[in-house]
Image: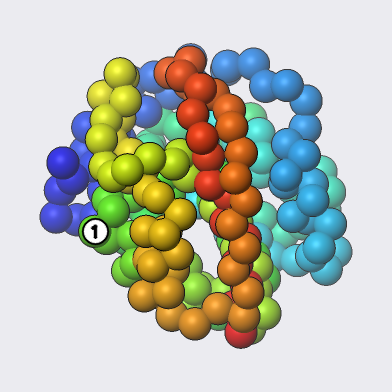
């Protein structure tokens, strides 16, 4: 379902094709989960965003005074985010992350859910390594019983909570790891269960 480089080519191609429409989709106000995440960080903290999409979350971080590095694996979406933010958005695929203790936090809202399930532990290890000691990491996933594609052809890892916890454990030790359950829709209009993971590096 996914290629050997650790990303799904068909999913990236979808976001490139749909970038303008995807980035312009309406959002209902501020991201409350992001605000809660930011409230626990030191003012001006450095944040790596994985999967910036249209740039709405990065914009919220910037407005609050954080030092944000927005990234996306899709050139089309990166261009849309650059247009919104008025600053460069780094083109970065998960498997290319090579930072070492650079960031106070990593924000990956509805992005790592596209990472091939068999490569997820390795990618999570890269995220862990990119964090400074005590750095915080948020990621959200659509829950399920294993990899599949949605009706738009996008790959999802659709993990169970147990599979997700196992992937994080394989990535390395964490000072804390909390999983919250939720329910909501997505770009495909389908309501699903979600798993929101908040972890901290020792």
> How many numbered marks appear?
1
Q: Position of residue 149 (x, y in %)?
A: 27, 30
Q: Quadrant of the C terminus?
A: bottom right
Q: Nearer the viewer, residue 50 or 189?
A: 189
The answer to whether any part of residue 85 appears in the image is no
Kindly indicate the quadrant of the structure image that contains residue 10: top left
> Could you tell whether 10 is left or right of 68 in the image?
left
Residue sitting at x 43%, y 23%? 19
Tell me: residue 65, above or below residue 60: below
Residue sitting at x 66%, y 40%? 57
Tell me: residue 56, above or below residue 91: above
Q: Position of residue 98 (x, y in %)?
A: 40, 71
> Could you tell whether 15 is left or right of 201 in the image?
left
> Could you tell whether 18 is left or right of 192 in the image?
left
Q: Position of residue 155 (x, y in %)?
A: 28, 36
Residue sitting at x 24%, y 59%? 118
The answer to whether any part of residue 131 appears in the image is yes
Q: Quadrant of the N terminus?
A: top left
Residue at image mark 1? 118
> Could you tell whether 37 is left or right of 49 in the image?
right
10 Å crowding of disc 1: few (<14), some (14-19), many (20+): few
As helix, strand or loop, the secondary structure at mark 1 comes to helix
Q: Nearer the viewer, residue 92 or 171?
A: 171
Tell me: residue 150, above or below residue 110: above
């Amino acid at each position: 379902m996914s290629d050997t480089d650790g990303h799904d080519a068909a999913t990236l191609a979808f976001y490139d094709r749909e970038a303008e429409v995807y980035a312009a989709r309406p959002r209902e106000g501020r991201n409350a989960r992001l605000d809660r995440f930011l409230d626990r960080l030191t003012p001006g903290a450095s944040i790596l965003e994985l999967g910036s999409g249209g740039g709405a979350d990065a914009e919220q971080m910037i407005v609050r005074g954080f030092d944000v590095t927005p990234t996306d694996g899709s050139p089309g979406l990166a261009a849309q985010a650059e247009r919104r933010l008025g600053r460069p958005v780094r083109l970065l695929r998960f498997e290319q992350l090579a930072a070492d203790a650079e960031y106070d936090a990593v924000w990956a809202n509805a992005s790592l859910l596209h990472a091939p399930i068999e490569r997820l532990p390795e990618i999570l290890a890269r995220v862990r390594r990119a964090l400074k000691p005590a750095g915080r990491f948020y990621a959200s996933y659509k829950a399920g019983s294993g990899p599949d594609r949605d009706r738009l052809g996008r790959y999802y890892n659709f993990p169970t909570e147990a599979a997700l916890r196992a992937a994080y454990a394989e990535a390395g030790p964490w000072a804390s790891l909390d999983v919250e359950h939720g329910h909501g829709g997505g770009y495909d209009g389908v309501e699903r269960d979600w798993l929101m993971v908040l972890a901290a590096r020792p």
